[in-house]
Image (cartoon, rainbow, N blue to C red):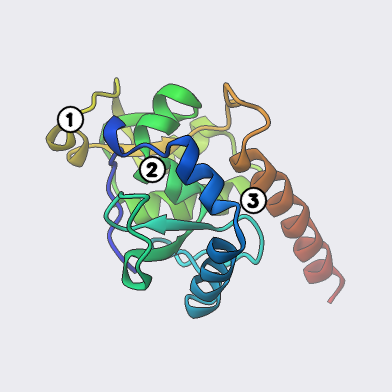
Amino acid sequence: MKPLFLLFAPPEKWRNANQSRRIEGEKWQRLRKKILDRDNFTCSYCNYRSEKYQIIDHIDGNPENNTYDNLQVICQMCNLIKHAGQGCVIKGVVDLYKESKYNQNAIIKITRKMRDEDAKDSEIIMVLGLKIKVPFKMDLVYLKKLFGFISSRLSNDNDDMYYKWLRYHNKHNKKWKTNKLEC
């Protein structure tokens, strides 16, 4: 598992219309499938496995660099942390804290597990030992010292990929819980 830190993509690296069209093409879809298969549909940061809604992430943050070694599978939650500016400012679902009992990878795993058990944000925050909430700043030195928490608030963009994944995950998780109880 790779260590996960709060980051952001500088505006000059944001995906433009030409890049967006390219990722819808057959060539990208074939490459995407190869990376998903290579990484067994498993997130490089938290080991979450899902055959739907996993993201192919550019390790160096450059959407033009589609080399095989620059691509990895990342889950929706880790993506919101890796692209903290999007998670904090645009979507409005990530909160930042100065203190935690755990590293960022563990925060993601514990949050997902506790949400699956229907825990509230306040309960999760307490278990994680998150303290001293702070604002987002486009400053990598500042962000590296912080911890991100993905809240259960609705996104500013309710039709985004994170919520499509969340609905899928919750449905899949409920089936798993039901099957486990029946055994």
Are the residues tagged 1 and 3 within 8 Å (C-beta)? Answer: no
Are the residues tagged 3 and 2 within 8 Å (C-beta)? Answer: no
Residue 139's disc number:
1
Identified by mark 2, the residue type is Ile
- Mark earlier in primary sequence (1, 3): 3
| Above or below, comparing residue 136 to residue 101 in the picture | above
Dot 2 surroundings within 10 Å: few (below 14), some, or many (20 or more)?
many
Q: Which residue is mark 3?
A: 116
Q: Nearer the viewer, residue 60 or 97?
A: 60
Q: Secondary structure at mark 3?
A: helix
Position of residue 8 measured from the top left corner of the image (x, y, whole percent) = 30, 37
- Mark earlier in primary sequence (3, 2): 2
- Mark earlier in primary sequence (2, 1): 2
Position of residue 121 measured from the top left corner of the image (x, y, whole percent) = 53, 33
| Above or below, comparing residue 135 to residue 83 in the picture | above
Identified by mark 1, the residue type is Asp
Q: Nearer the viewer, mark 1 or mark 3?
A: 1
Q: Which residue is mark 2?
A: 81
Identified by mark 3, the residue type is Asp
- Say if residue 117 shows up in the picture: no
